[in-house]
Image: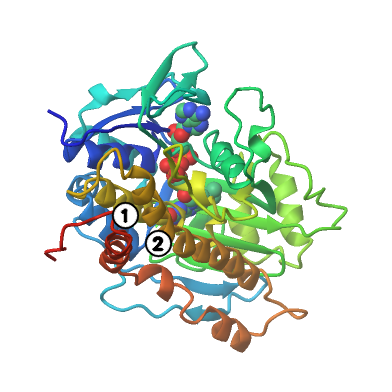
Amino acid sequence: MASKDFTVAIVGGGMCGLVCAYALAKAGVAVEVFEAAPEFGEVGAGVGLGPNAVRALDRLGVLSAVLARSEHTSPILRPFIFVSGYDAQEVIYDYPVGEEDRGLPIHRAAFLNAIIGISDMKIAHVNKRCIAIEHSSTSEPGSTLLFSDGTSHRAHLIIGADGIKSTIRQYVVDALAGSAETSDNNSNNNKHNLAFSGTSAYRGLLPNSTVVAAGVKIDLTVQPVSFCGMDRHIITFPIQAGRIINVVAFSTITRGDSAGGSLDELPHPWVQPVAKQELIETFQAGGWGAESDAIKLLNCMEKPSRWSIHTVEPPLSSYVDAERGIALVGDAAHGMLPHLGAGVGQGFEDVVVLTELLTHPETNSSNLPHVLKAYDSVRQPRANMVLEGSARTGRIMERYGKSGYSNEEMRTQLAGMWGPVWHHDLTEDISKAVATLKENRVFKQAESS
Ligand SMILES: Cc1cc2nc3c(=O)[nH]c(=O)nc-3n(C[C@H](O)[C@H](O)[C@H](O)COP(=O)(O)OP(=O)(O)OC[C@H]3O[C@@H](n4cnc5c(N)ncnc54)[C@H](O)[C@@H]3O)c2cc1C
């Protein structure tokens, strides 16, 4: 028998959606997850999980399953080293880390397989693209998800875990604007608080042997490296015990940069194969020398693709429509630039707070709106802070050079940047949310811990 008198439907079976479904199902909540794709899978290669993300996974009870699918038996220390992208591979800053700063690099597909391996997949449905939410006009509680195959599903609570291109976000945004629409006649889904960031990412996976043969001198197998410049930077991190180097090269245009296109229009398609020459020219135009490690590295990328990075912009002032029973988690709520490596970690923090509040003994169908507001009150300020920090970190890494920051200024700017992301107490957040619920007489029970 279900532990709660309400039902939950999760839209999106990515990293956040599947973990959320697992946590709720484990607590006996009646939950179903609906994924648009024909199978559960992740685009892209590795993802770096920071110490806070690792702690969140531990709290959700999935860390050991995830570790079992990773290359590591326990979380590891992997400090970033920042180097010049110009000719001399000068070290700008070796980011200091402590024992408690252990994170985990993992292949995205391996992560999903870990969660699938411990989940009851009878509650997970593929080929279910949600196209709209229909709110009941009767007194019957809950809302109905409408899918592109003509089917529907009703639940008391809808969790939008449908990523940066979220369909569910529009309902929260509309509610915030006081003009919630209840039909599928809104043809403008993707324009709801979604913008091209001006940053393009060229991604590739390179055998380290190829990188070494190309004459790259810096050892990329030891730790993540950030090559910095003006309006451009490259991140590398080793995977498969250093046999493969994951490379993401970023280039950013600013408003009015005629060469780069317009920030007002969303580039289509979002992911596009490009000629290697485009990539090389983009970085050489920024003064990166042909003999630099960075350009030699880019020369190894035989079939680069360009990703137009989109973010939730402007940031949402709330992640919930409490009255209609909708909550957002992950990129649907706060899709951010990847420069702090914190996007999915913030999603896992959402999932911890939301699932612990939903499974609290005092939570039931009648106080769900209050519980959603309590979730929002702790998650929205924190995740939006990280979203803004991610943009700021990108601006620092891309202001290095003669007309930008010196080495000393870079060190000052980057010092402690990851501290607030990595060191955060979710127990305190949850206690704060519960205390608010008690103050407002929504929860009666005294907290035992
Ligand atoms: C270049 C790059 C590097 C990054 N590196 C890092 C990193 O190192 N560390 C980190 O923490 N984060 C990183 N991120 C961010 C991270 O990838 C995201 O934060 C994370 O994938 C978000 O997970 P999610 O589950 O919210 O969304 P997604 O992973 O996007 O999953 C959403 C799911 O919803 C499904 N869906 C979408 N619409 C619908 C619909 N209408 N109906 C049903 N299903 C739907 C999709 O098919 C998908 O499966 C990076 C991002 C980029 C672009």
- Give the residue drawn at x 24%, y 26%: 121
Inspect the image, locate mark 1, and give the three-letter code of the amino acid beneath it: Val
Q: Quadrant of residue 31?
A: top left
Q: Position of residue 104 (x, y in %)?
A: 31, 58
Residue 142 visible in the snapshot: yes
Determine which of the numbered discs, if any, sits on residue 353 in the image. Answer: 1
Determine which of the numbered discs, if any, sits on residue 378 in the image. Answer: 2
- Give the residue drawn at x 88%, y 53%: 258
Inspect the image, locate mark 2, and give the three-letter code of the amino acid beneath it: Val
- Give the residue drawn at x 44%, y 47%: 330
Q: Does residue 165 appear left or right of residue 405 in this picture?
A: left
Query: Quick one: SS at disc 2?
Result: helix
Q: Quadrant of residue 24?
A: top left
Q: Position of residue 1 (x, y in %)?
A: 12, 28
Q: Nearer the viewer, residue 445 or 314?
A: 445
Q: Considering only vertical position in the picture, is 335 above or below 252?
A: above
Q: Nearer the viewer, residue 96 or 39?
A: 39
Please state, as top left, top right, bottom left or bottom right, where the C terminus lies in the image: bottom left
Q: Quadrant of residue 54?
A: bottom left
In this picture the colour scheme is: rainbow
- Give the residue drawn at x 57%, y 53%: 316
Q: Position of residue 409 (x, y in %)?
A: 62, 86
